[in-house]
Image: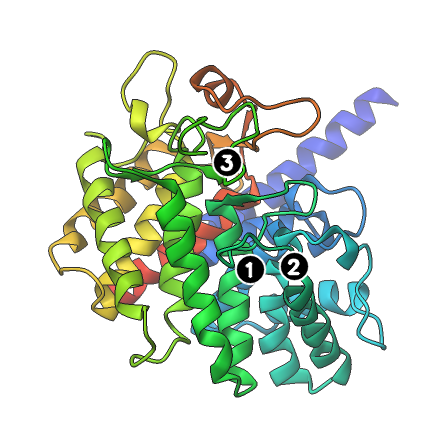
Amino acid sequence: MKMKLICRYLLLGIIFFPMLVKAEKESNKLPWSVRMTQSEMIRNPKAWQLDFQTRLKWDYCHGLELQSMLDVYDRYGDQKIFNYVLAYADSIVHDDGSIETYKMSSYSLDHINSGKILFRIYEQTKKKKYKKAQDLLRSQLDKQPRNADGGFWHKKIYPHQMWLDGLYMGSPFYAEYSFRNNRPEDYADVVNQFLTVARHTYDPVTGLYRHACDVSHTQQWADPLTGQSKHCWGRALGWYSMAIVDALDFIPKHEVGRDSMILIMNQIASQVKRLQDKTGVWYQVLDRSGDKGNYLESSCSCMFVYSLFKAVRKGYIDASYLKVAVRGYKGILKQFIKVDNQGLVSVTKVCAVAGLGGHPYRSGDYNYYIHEKIRDNDAKAVGPFIMASLEYERLKK
């Protein structure tokens, strides 16, 4: 019996191996953005399985990666990609516009990010539930806890804290919703979020923006004088830079403070250029680049490359930064991108998560950041890699 099974598998191998080789050769001709999208759809047959999930969940990682897939669909077509994203939206957004697992009472900016995929899905399906879901998420911002200067708390459970991460989670949605729903009165608040977090997190010694601030100066991780966290975490600055270039798409050129956002992007670009490693990519803890225990990390590298490409294309930063972006993109391909013998593309060396405070308590010191879990194909690198690839492919065209 065992011999028959062995013979059967050998026969199948003889039949299908040439087909796999041919398929891999064909996939090698495709753009990296398409190859990564297809690989993720194979690894995760259902979109809710992205980011290692075992159940349906409304999560910022899904919004990040599925939005990048919609960008691929918009650029190259393939209805299977749109259907993949739509299946997730259909299963998690109810007919009344409510969203499975979403709880407004948590007042977490993380819960806003995935709302961005609903704009394009509503445009193409015209299902009213998607407009209702957009409105639901926008209503959270009306009640989101704030500091005295108007800055949103990152979450209700993190009082008085602004995190750079939170700017990406909330502000691009806020800006796009304002644009699409003719709410020009909201732009000033959108801009204020960016300028306020910059004021609270900027470190004049390094020229970088630290991960977060606690304006009450009460957290253990917060500097007693400034309220700032201890370090500039690469991905936090990556989130912030992506938030700037994406929100600017929807903020009118005449809006007061928009020019200040562009100046911040120029400041970030100059530091990203300064700290670029000889490999072309960037370190997990930017203000300790090259130090013992620190490592080259893929998610922040992909985020920086995407932001630089887009900022150059939009004219926000000098065209000379294009060389930094191209060098970074080639570095990403060499340092982090792997292709298996079936042609599936993976992005490696992704910091799984990093935060501050909470339970168990996260101190935010150097030792903490360099010892968080590292894994492959985390959505926080996959999405930005697809986005950076699309920018590079646009450049080549």
Asked if residue 9 is positioned above or below residue 77 in the image, the reply reads: above
Which mark is first along the chain, 2 or 1?
2
- Secondary structure type for disc 2: loop
**Mark 1 vs 2: CB contact within 8 A:** yes
Tell which of 182 and 74 is nearer to you.
182
Q: Quadrant of the N terminus?
A: top right
Of tags 1 and 3, which is closer to the observer? 1
Could you give the CA–CA distance between mark 1 and mark 2, rounded to whole angstroms? 11 Å
> Residue 396: image x %, image y %?
23, 63
Label 1 Cα crowd, 10 Å radius (few <14 / some 14-19 / many 20+): many
Instruction: Locate residue 65: give its quadrant.
Output: bottom right
Please give the name of the residue rendered at 46% of the width and 29% of the height, measured from the top-left corner: 349
Residue 150 can be seen, yes or no: yes
Decide if residue 342 is on the left or right side of residue 390. Answer: right
Residue at label 2?
144
Q: Position of residue 163 (x, y in %)?
A: 50, 44
Q: Earlier in the sequence, mark 1 or mark 3?
A: 1
Assign a secondary structure to mark 1: helix
Residue 261 image point, x, y percent? 31, 61
Q: Tell me the tag on residue 341.
A: 3
Residue at point 65% right, 71% down? 138
